[in-house]
Amino acid sequence: MNKECAVDIVAPTSVAALAATLDYEASPADGEALPPLWHWIFFRPTVRQTLIAADGHPQKGGFLPDLGLPRRMWAGGRLRFPAPVRVGERITRESRVLDVREKQGRTGRLGFVTVAHRIESNGTLAIEEEHDIVYREAGTTASAPTAAPADEAWQRTLMPDETLLFRYSALTFNAHRIHYDTPYVTGTEGYPGLVVHGPLIATLLMDLLRRQRPDAIVREFSFKALRPCFAGNALHLCGQPSADGKSIELWSKDQEGWLGMTAHATLD
């Protein structure tokens, strides 16, 4: 299976930019722990401009396999946080393609690629991650929607707009055109509007937990994207702690009450 390594620095300026994007007055200072999932703004995919595909993604067939399916999106993942990543530290990431599968679904041919990441901060294992990517045929539509639960203890409602999507794309150096190019996303991909990044929604769900339980230490987190959310529509972020407070069920729902993403966090 393919394998690659990368090195980065948890730059305070980048951390401050994400904090501002998430609407915080202050950001973690040098030496403080990076909030969970904020590591996604590092190890940016600095692919040469001539190696970018028509959809804005890096061309397939390098680290990620080419399955002959044009549409590619982040579908979910599982993470462990054995130690903190700290602002200002040097971080390294070793990545490998863990699994490649294809199947015929109700919406057409699908491909599933799982990438494993191992991230160290100053030589200490800090994050273990499995990242799921789904490949789909052109012109396919999402499966039937599912009604979201209505028993949340926590809820925060946002209205993701073009500015939020642009800032998150810039922070992650993500050129996927579905997040900023309206003529492309409606005319070529067939969506009704700009698509909110799956990782951004997962980060907002984790941020809901952080705002409700600021002292909590998250040890494990998993999430699964079920239905896209679009710019200009309400995004409801919901959470329900377990009776003992050791785990949190999280989910997002759209303006019609359809389930967009589910997530589960395990706390110390």
Image (cartoon, rainbow, N blue to C red):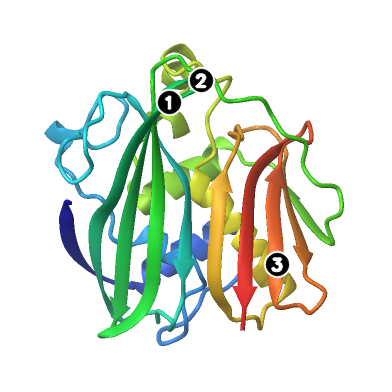
Report the Cα–Cα distance between label 1 and label 3: 35 Å
Q: Position of residue 120 (x, y in %)?
A: 29, 77
Q: Secondary structure at mark 2?
A: loop
Q: Is residue 180 visible?
A: no
Q: Is residue 151 left or right of residue 68?
A: right
Q: Residue at x 38, y 79 (%)?
A: 126
Q: Residues within 10 Å of mark 2 (few under 14, many from 20)?
A: some
When asked about the image quadrant of residue 227, the answer is top right
Closer to viewer: mark 1 or mark 2: 2
Report the Cα–Cα distance between label 2 and label 3: 31 Å
Q: Position of residue 70 (x, y in %)?
A: 32, 24
Q: Position of residue 165 (x, y in %)?
A: 50, 41
Q: Residue at x 55, y 48 (%)?
A: 224
Q: Is residue 51 left or right of residue 148?
A: left
As shown in the figure, which amino acid type bears the numbered disc 1?
Asp
Are the residues flagged by discs 2 and 3 in contact, CB closer than 8 Å?
no
Q: Residue at x 46, y 49 (%)?
A: 168
Vertical order, 31 against 145 (above or below): below
Report the Cα–Cα distance between label 1 and label 2: 24 Å
Near-viewer residue (258 or 54): 258
When asked about the image quadrant of residue 153, the answer is bottom right
Q: Is residue 248 left or right of residue 111?
A: right
Q: Of the numbered discs in the image, which one, if any, rests on residue 107?
A: 2
Closer to the chain start, of discs 1 and 3, is 1
As shown in the figure, which amino acid type bears the numbered disc 3?
Ile
Q: Quadrant of the C terminus?
A: bottom right
Closer to viewer: mark 2 or mark 3: 2
Q: Of the numbered discs in the image, which one, if any, rests on residue 181?
A: 1
As shown in the figure, which amino acid type bears the numbered disc 2?
Thr
